[in-house]
């Protein structure tokens, strides 16, 4: 029996239409699978528009699993559920088909995409779906612009399109009659949430203005007094910072902003201000005009610092490791250890992100280590471990073992391909028997030709795999030794990304351990090799570089 995944998707518009609801789509897919003797082995669905493909987490998970498990089909209700941008549709289908996974639609006729008519039919559907999505997006956006500029006759406040209101406000739905189709009309406005508004005024006017607290101190005060944020969680520094953004402060003063965020161009968070839809006196004010000016004046004094932000992070240890896990972690909370500039001198340090953003209640690990010191230590350890004769031999042995494991995967792929080739050969023989027994010769020959074409493609793949399997990969110890002994020279000419990749090659995990005042390193290829790097005199403000190295060497002579 053939196997398949099923995938459903609804947008907010579809959710209102029972014919396109998740249960309705599921019912049509299940009936289709039953009629065609297909077994459903996995179920996926998303509730976001396909026009923003990055939001479809389950769709992307499905693609990853399909490549591994190789079901015969992925079944959807119709082609618009797969993707509404042609670029994404073409690329995704290409990947799936290269692994033998075909796409089927329960509500659309099947046309073989390998035929000329099938190719054109699929292309037309993809263009149609994308143009439909863009047309819907255009009219939806047009309606939303009109909605946020429209005022409610009874309250005088502007209507809202949706989304979560800022801290201190709540959404209120208003019944405003019946439309032409007899459906009730509901409109949304923002009203003041009295409890959260009091907390907001305390943050802005008491803690920030009157007591002159920093963002970190405001965060700690709120958390220590068990005052929760809008999600019922601990406050973070970034949340306090976002509350004091100019536009957010103006929204507390009754101004509404729409179309601020740029959702189409990567790397650009906000649209130009000219494209924003701004409405004054759009909702009740939590802070007065005078209070807004006082907060803005202090905020502007604090942000005008002579420091230039560098868009490319200079911290080598804040990335992921080769296994796509955090490279540098905290021993207390297992959170990500990240780099940041601290103090008036903008000193570069590494610290636990949970402690840094949410304070002691989130994580007690308050240890901060100097960036230059720890990165230098790590490169020194790498060079000392992997440039000895023993280290080179261990490294080459591990690489050869990895290559052997990869070749083992070739055996599995080759066995699968041979099985599929033999299966097609049996189908061809059955068709020949059917022709002898009197079925239409033209239909029989056509099916045989299709089967042979598919069989030849599989044989080509099999031939390539068998050639790759026979290749002997040689790694010379001297080549690796030459590379490792020149790490320092390589680093002098390497950019940030290249340095990160070099660290990922040798370091699996770094642990910031405040309790024992040490940093643990797990190095490839042997995970059991753990180095404990003591802080030594790194925290002595007057220690010179050579003193720090001497002290560390004395504390941990086995490292060198």
Image: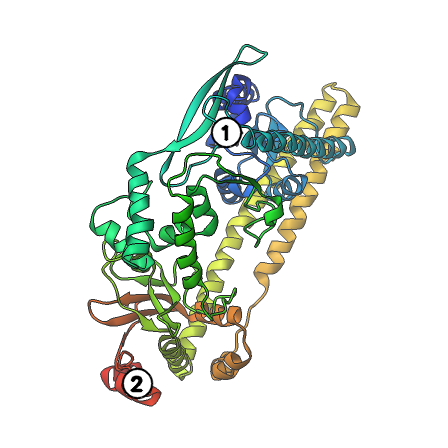
Find residue 548 and name its label.
2
**Which mark sits nearer the N-terminus, 2 or 1?**
1
| Residue at the top extreme of this rendering | 182
Q: Dot 2, how many residues are within 10 Å of its Cα: few (below 14), some (14-19), or many (20+)? A: some
Q: What x and y, as percent, mark residue 241?
A: 39, 54
Q: Dot 1, how many residues are within 10 Å of its Cα: few (below 14), some (14-19), or many (20+)? A: many
Q: What x and y, as percent, mark residue 328?
A: 36, 64
In the depicted view, which residue is nearer to us: 301 or 199? Answer: 301
Assign a secondary structure to mark 1.
loop
Q: What colour scheme governs how the chains and residues are painted in the rendered image of this protein? A: rainbow
Q: Which residue lies under the disc numbered 1?
A: 159
Q: What x and y, as percent, mark residue 506?
A: 42, 71
Work out whether 74 lies above or below 208.
above
The quadrant the C terminus occupies is bottom left
Asked whether, in this view, residue 349 is left or right of residue 268, the answer is left
In the depicted view, which residue is nearer to us: 444 or 24? Answer: 24
Identify the residue at horizontal 74%, vertical 32% (top origin): 124
Quarter-wise, where is residue 263 in the image? top right
Marks 2 and 1 sit apart, C-alpha to C-alpha, by 62 Å
Identify the residue at horizontal 70%, vertical 33% (top origin): 131
In the depicted view, which residue is nearer to us: 553 or 202? Answer: 202
Assign a secondary structure to mark 2.
helix
Q: What x and y, as percent, mark residue 514?
A: 23, 67
Asked whether, in this view, residue 80 is left or right of residue 329, the answer is right
Find residue 319 and name its label.
none
In the depicted view, which residue is nearer to us: 406 or 373? Answer: 373
- Residue 336 seen by the camera: yes
Work out whether 249 lies above or below 186.
below
């Amino acid at each position: 029996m053939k196997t398949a995944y099923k995938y459903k998707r609804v947008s907010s518009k579809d959710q209102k239409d029972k014919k396109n609801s998740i249960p309705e789509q599921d019912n049509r897919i299940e009936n289709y699978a039953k009629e065609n003797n297909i077994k459903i082995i996995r179920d996926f669905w998303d509730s976001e528009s396909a026009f923003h493909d990055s939001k479809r987490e389950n769709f992307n998970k499905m693609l990853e699993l399909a490549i591994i498990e190789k079901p015969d089909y992925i079944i959807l209700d119709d082609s618009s559920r797969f993707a509404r941008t042609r670029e994404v549709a073409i690329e995704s289908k290409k990947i799936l088909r290269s692994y033998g996974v075909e796409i089927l639609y329960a509500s659309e006729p099947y046309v073989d995409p390998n035929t000329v008519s099938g190719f054109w039919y699929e292309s037309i559907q993809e263009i149609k779906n994308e143009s439909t999505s863009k047309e819907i997006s255009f009219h939806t956006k047009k309606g939303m612009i009109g909605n946020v500029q429209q005022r409610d006759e009874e309250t005088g406040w502007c209507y809202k399109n949706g989304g979560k209101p800022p801290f201190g406000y709540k959404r209120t739905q208003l019944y405003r009659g019946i439309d032409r189709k007899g459906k009730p009309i509901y409109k949304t406005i923002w009203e003041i949430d009295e409890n959260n508004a009091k907390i907001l005024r305390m943050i802005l006017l008491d803690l920030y203005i009157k007591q002159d607290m920093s963002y970190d101190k405001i965060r700690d005060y709120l958390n220590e007094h068990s005052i929760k944020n809008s999600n019922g969680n601990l406050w973070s520094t970034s949340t306090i910072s976002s509350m004091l953004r100019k536009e957010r402060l103006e929204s507390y003063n009754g101004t509404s902003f729409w179309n601020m965020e740029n959702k189409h161009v990567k790397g650009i968070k906000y649209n130009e201000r000219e494209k924003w839809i701004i409405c004054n006196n759009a909702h009740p004010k939590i802070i007065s005009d005078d209070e807004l000016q006082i907060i803005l004046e202090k905020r502007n004094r604090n942000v005008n610092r002579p420091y230039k932000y560098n868009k490319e992070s200079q911290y080598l240890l804040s990335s992921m490791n080769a296994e796509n896990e955090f490279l540098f972690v905290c021993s207390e909370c297992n959170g990500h250890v990240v780099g940041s500039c601290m103090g008036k001198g903008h000193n570069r340090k590494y610290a636990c992100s949970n402690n840094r953003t949410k304070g002691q209640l989130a994580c007690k690990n308050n240890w901060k280590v100097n960036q230059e010191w720890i990165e230098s230590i790590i490169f020194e350890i790498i060079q000392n471990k992997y440039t000895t004769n023993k280290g080179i031999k261990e490294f080459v042995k591990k690489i050869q073992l990895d290559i052997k494991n990869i070749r083992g995967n070739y055996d599995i792929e080759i066995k699968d391909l041979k099985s599929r080739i033999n299966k097609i050969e049996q189908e061809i023989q059955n068709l020949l028997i059917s022709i002898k027994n009197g079925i239409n010769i033209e239909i029989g020959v056509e099916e045989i030709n299709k089967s042979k074409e598919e069989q030849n493609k599989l044989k080509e793949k099999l031939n390539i795999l068998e050639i790759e399997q026979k290749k002997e990969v040689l790694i010379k110890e001297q080549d690796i030794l030459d590379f490792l002994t020149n790490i320092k020279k390589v680093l002098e000419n390497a950019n940030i990304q290249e340095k990160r990749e070099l660290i990922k090659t040798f370091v699996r995990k770094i642990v910031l351990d405040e309790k024992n005042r040490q940093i643990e390193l797990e190095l490839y290829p042997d995970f059991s090799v753990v180095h404990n790097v003591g802080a030594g005199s790194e925290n002595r403000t007057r220690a010179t570089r050579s003193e720090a190295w001497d002290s560390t060497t004395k504390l941990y002579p086995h490292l060198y």
